[in-house]
């Protein structure tokens, strides 16, 4: 199980505000149990006009712990997803688009993530298939191949086990254990740092209700940052729009005390359980393979 000591280490991994990169469940709450799965009619499960059936995992949006655990363990609530989002930071000056494709099938994982820096006009692509991760750095014209064996999503992690208080007053933050790393796409698909950081203190946030977003039900969360995060993120408050069924962040905004937007992540395309082939980017002939000491 991965863990991070409270403090700067947690903040450095959060993909918001210019720091981006890169209750005990009952048996009926366990998303892996077939008894909890309910099939809905295609008319209810339409996503972007595609007639697909989606497994529905009931969520009590008035229970803050359930909401937090849904976001923390989002990988457990979907098997395929394809989409894109736009991230901007007025604080640091980021302007990125991220396109992603992810499929879990028969314990086999495939994914492709393309991140474009709109200001620098550079892109980075990362893909995984057949036990190998390939990364393309277009600005430097280099590529890297890494042997990996990614097969599962890890165990569902309860809040009590995710945040552990030590006898000296420090805290350890544990994240769901999986070797899958989607880079910037995780800020939407698996926002585990936001779940543990922004939502740690239940007295500082509440669920406003739900809104329709990209034909999905989004849980709207309004919160105030702790003094620690206010200093680190240069923001006073935040709003999150979390896909109710999957825990994926469809939109997030942080604000100054005057209500001005500091950072924004907004999903522009989103499809769940659509059939698609994951892209396998080709390595250009003029790209050199990365080696230790190679400038990057």
Image (tube, grey):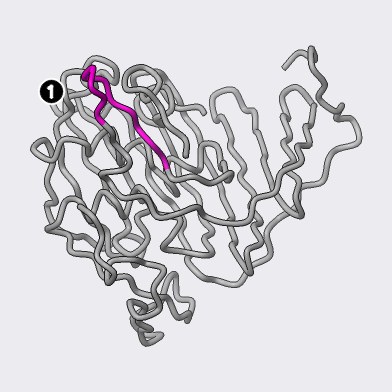
* Up-down relation of residue 49 to residue 158 (above or below): below
Does the segment drawn in magenta span residue 169? Answer: yes
The C terminus - image quarter = top right
Q: Residue sitting at 89 percent across and 30 percent down?
A: 286
Residue at image position (87%, 26%) is 288
Q: Residue furthest right?
A: 285
Residue shown at 27%/64% (left/top)? 217
Query: Which sits in the foreground, 257 or 105?
Result: 105
Q: Where is residue 183 in the image (x, y as percent from the top left)?
A: 55, 37
Q: Is mark 1 on a helix, strand or loop?
A: loop
Q: What residue sits right under mark 1 in the picture?
A: 257
Q: How crowded is mark 1: few (under 14 residues within 10 Å), some or many (20 or more)?
A: few
Q: Can residue 245 be seen here?
A: yes
Q: Which of 73 and 231 is in front in this view?
A: 73
Q: In this view, does 8 lie to the left or right of 118?
A: left
Q: How many marks?
A: 1
Residue 145 vs residue 101, the one in the foreground: 145
Q: Give the range drawn in magenta.
A: 165-175
- Left or right position of 276 against 136: left
Q: Is residue 43 above or below residue 263?
A: below
Residue 124 occupies which quadrant of the picture?
A: top right
User: Where, by quadrant of the figure, is residue 86 drawn?
Assistant: top left
Residue 174 is covered by the magenta coloring: yes
Rendered position, 172 above or below 155? above
Q: In this view, does 81 lie to the left or right of 56?
A: right
- Please identify the residue farthest to the front as the structure is shown: 167
Give percent across and percent down for residue 151.
Answer: 63, 56
Residue 25: image x %, image y %?
26, 60
Q: Quadrant of residue 119?
A: top right
State the residue at coordinates (65%, 33%): 123
Q: Can residue 18 be seen in this view?
A: no
């Amino acid at each position: 199980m991965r863990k991070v000591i409270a403090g700067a280490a947690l903040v450095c991994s959060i993909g918001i505000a210019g720091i981006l990169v890169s209750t005990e469940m009952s048996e009926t709450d366990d998303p892996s149990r077939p008894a909890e799965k309910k099939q809905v009619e295609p008319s209810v499960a339409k996503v972007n006009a595609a007639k697909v059936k989606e497994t529905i995992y009931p969520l009590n949006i008035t229970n803050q712990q359930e909401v937090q655990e849904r976001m923390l363990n989002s990988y457990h609530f979907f098997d395929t997803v394809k989409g894109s989002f736009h991230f901007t930071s007025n604080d640091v000056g980021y302007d990125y688009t991220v396109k992603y494709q992810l499929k879990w099938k028969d314990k086999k994982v495939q994914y492709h993530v393309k991140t474009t820096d709109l200001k620098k006009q550079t892109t980075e692509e990362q893909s995984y298939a057949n036990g190998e991760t390939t990364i393309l750095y277009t600005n430097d014209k280099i590529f890297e191949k890494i042997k990996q064996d990614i097969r599962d999503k890890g165990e569902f992690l309860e809040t009590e086990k995710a945040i552990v208080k030590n006898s000296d007053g420090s805290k350890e933050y544990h994240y769901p254990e999986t070797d899958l790393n989607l880079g910037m796409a995780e800020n939407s698909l698996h926002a585990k740092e936001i779940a543990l950081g922004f939502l740690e203190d239940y007295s500082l946030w509440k669920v406003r209700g739900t809104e329709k977003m990209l034909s999905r039900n989004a849980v709207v969360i309004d919160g105030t940052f702790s003094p620690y995060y206010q200093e680190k993120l240069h923001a006073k408050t935040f709003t999150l729009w979390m896909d109710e069924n999957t825990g994926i962040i469809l939109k997030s905004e942080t604000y100054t005390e005057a209500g001005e937007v500091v950072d924004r992540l907004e999903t522009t395309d989103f499809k769940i359980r659509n059939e698609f082939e994951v892209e396998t980017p080709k390595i250009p002939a003029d790209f050199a393979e990365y080696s230790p000491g190679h400038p990057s």
